[in-house]
Image (cartoon, coloured by chain):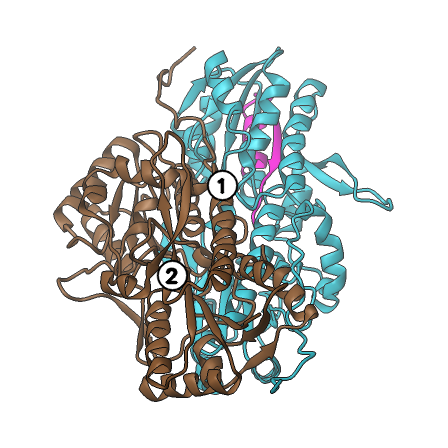
Chain colours: A brown, B cyan
Amino acid sequence: MRKVAVGQAGGPSAVINATLAGFIEQTRKNHKLVLVENGYQGLVEERFLPGTSDSLTWVVNHRHVPGACLKSGRYPLEKAAIAKAVANLKKHQIDTLVFIGGNGTMEALYHIQQEAERNGYPLQVIGLPKTVDNDIGATDHAPGFASAANYVARTTKDMSRDLYAMNNFEQIRVLETMGRNAGWLALAAGAYRTFNEEGPHFIAVPEEQLNKEALLQTVRKAIKSYGYALVVVSEGVQWQEGRQMELNRVDGRTVLGGISKEIRDFLSQECKGTARAELLGMNQRSSSAYVSKVDALEAYQAGVEGGRWVEEGRNGCMVSIRRKQADYYTIELRPVNLYEVIAEGERRLPPSFIKERESYFKWLRPLLGGDDPSYPPLKQRRVEYSEY
Amino acid sequence: MRKVAVGQAGGPSAVINATLAGFIEQTRKNHKLVLVENGYQGLVEERFLPGTSDSLTWVVNHRHVPGACLKSGRYPLEKAAIAKAVANLKKHQIDTLVFIGGNGTMEALYHIQQEAERNGYPLQVIGLPKTVDNDIGATDHAPGFASAANYVARTTKDMSRDLYAMNNFEQIRVLETMGRNAGWLALAAGAYRTFNEEGPHFIAVPEEQLNKEALLQTVRKAIKSYGYALVVVSEGVQWQEGRQMELNRVDGRTVLGGISKEIRDFLSQECKGTARAELLGMNQRSSSAYVSKVDALEAYQAGVEGGRWVEEGRNGCMVSIRRKQADYYTIELRPVNLYEVIAEGERRLPPSFIKERESYFKWLRPLLGGDDPSYPPLKQRRVEYSEY
């Protein structure tokens, strides 16, 4: 019987509550649970709620609900804040701290544990991964990404049909996805593309300097061949070398956005066509309709696994997903040390995936949970307009 | 056996292909079909494709695909263009013209028939309704609207959970829906709201002048009570009296957008909070994941009904949906004269629905196809942060 504090941190996802539900269902019987509200802020400001039977059931009922039911949010966890967090944990006699979050969370857990050790206070810490843009290292992928990728892939496929229909009014559409430094989400836009004519006709990822000439040529060619062009671009793509587009800056954190508008203006000018830019927005991380079944299950399983580790006494590690070698898609959950995750930094697309997109889609498709809408082909015109 | 030309016009929807599929399945056996590509432009420029067995099957296979598979788009149908369209129909010996579209399409059909009559050319015309923003008159509602409304309602519900989770970073979010002159879509944002805390906390529709003071008070109160505020606004809302926000102007048609940014700036300033504005975008009309089952079925049935009317010789009318008086939701499809549809103009929300939102939701919910995600309540805090 341990006293276990659990919280959620960073931007939410469509399945972060599934991970929490799995963790709680695994641990509620044998341990005393404490719910930390508002992520790190709650740690520092002592927003600890007792895990009563009612409150735990309320949390578990959020398994299929997007957003973080304990509240997550952003909070700068600096030295003094870490000391305060540790003091609070000690004061409440917490034995185990479990947080669901991204790279920043894994780093925070590591520092909290170091600080606890320096205070002669043995604290078990376990990290459960959560991402939207798949930039967590030391894991094949992380829960949250596949649902966001499915959103991007299906939306792009649907938009392609929409633009096809509207091309006497609008010839160019530029969709902007999340992904500050990694292009996993933007590249996912092509996952359900089955015909040459279908968009996306061009994808730009932050890992590579945008090649304006290639963009322009591809768009011109698509317009010539099909009458329209669909471009997908990650918010983190640099329009001019070394410069990302800032929408806003909040508490020292840059909110990116706007690269799609730059590209729209450029293409509209160069191609003399009507162009529209669209940010895919918060739906990428919060849409309940595009949740991948595989993602939802893996998110839950990661929580359950973290719960088992509390028992087993694993410490200073994150639940990582390893893809097993098999003819079909199957995974195992393994511990990786937090410092390994930290050392890997923001995981970007490997060059092989950028170069060979089909290899990326092959890697990605099993995660999407069979949600491919499988549309019939766009018309390959077999008949000509004719008098008959 | 008649020679029947069929086309799609205006902005596509998620179910416009279902209407086309229903029409074709009903008529393909007994009539000779001609597919008109690119809407009115195809009529004028003679883009007539023979309805071969292959091409008709290809069209029918699009029943569940968003976008208009014959291409629709925008095209100014002026006097000379109407004359040309009629000449083309006559040249191809078309007996019946069927178009799927909105108000503009019903008007176009009416004028085409008038022009045909003046030329002593008896042309049967039938209109099949399609909308996203529900502004077609002389019908209870029209296919396409419910899927878009479901998109808006579910997205708002999911976003509310997302904002709840992130409120230490972002306190205000302003979502902008489609709806140039009618607020049906924006008001639908509240259809799945079940708890006081849940957003949307304020909805602005174009039928009413925006009351900035009421907006500000409501947002301040929501922030005070819940820590965040979610606002939904129709693109057609006027920020200053008599002035809609223009994003763009294409071929004389104004593309609206941007009112959410004005509201964001205003609220951010006045409430000293961080605010984000989001356009819900083209997904409202093209998302395949939010299609209402009821909408998809009614869209198909409207097409089938139009097909029956070809046989029956009905003329100059549109398929309209009448809600029957019953304990449960049930409809019948009835003909209305095109000139009645035209006379009603752009149908706006009745004042009773604006005033009594619950009556609107009661009217709306059956159309949404039971897609309510039914989330557990946001935490009504029963326990206090405590030492234990």
| Residue on which the image places disc 2 | A318
Question: What stretch of residues is rendered in magenta?
Answer: B108-133
Secondary-structure class at tag 2:
strand
Q: Please state which amino acid type lies under the numbered disc 1.
A: Pro
Q: Residue at x 31, y 58 (%)?
A: A135
Picture layout, residue B70 above or below residue A189:
above
Percent position (x, y) of residue A164? 38, 37
Q: Position of residue B129 (x, y in %)?
A: 61, 39
Crowding at dot 1, Cα within 10 Å, few <14 / some 14-19 / many 20+, comes out as many
| Residue A83 image-quadrant placement | bottom left
The label nearer to you, 2 versus 1, is 2
Q: Position of residue B245 (x, y in %)?
A: 44, 67
Residue, disc 1: B12
Q: Which amino acid is tagged 2?
A: Met
On the picture, is B313 further left or further right than A97? right
| Alpha carbon distance from label 2 to label 1 | 46 Å
Chain ID, mark 1: B
Residue beneath the point at 57% across and 63% down:
A27
Residue nearest the viewer, comparing A87 with B235:
A87
Q: Secondary structure at mark 1?
A: loop
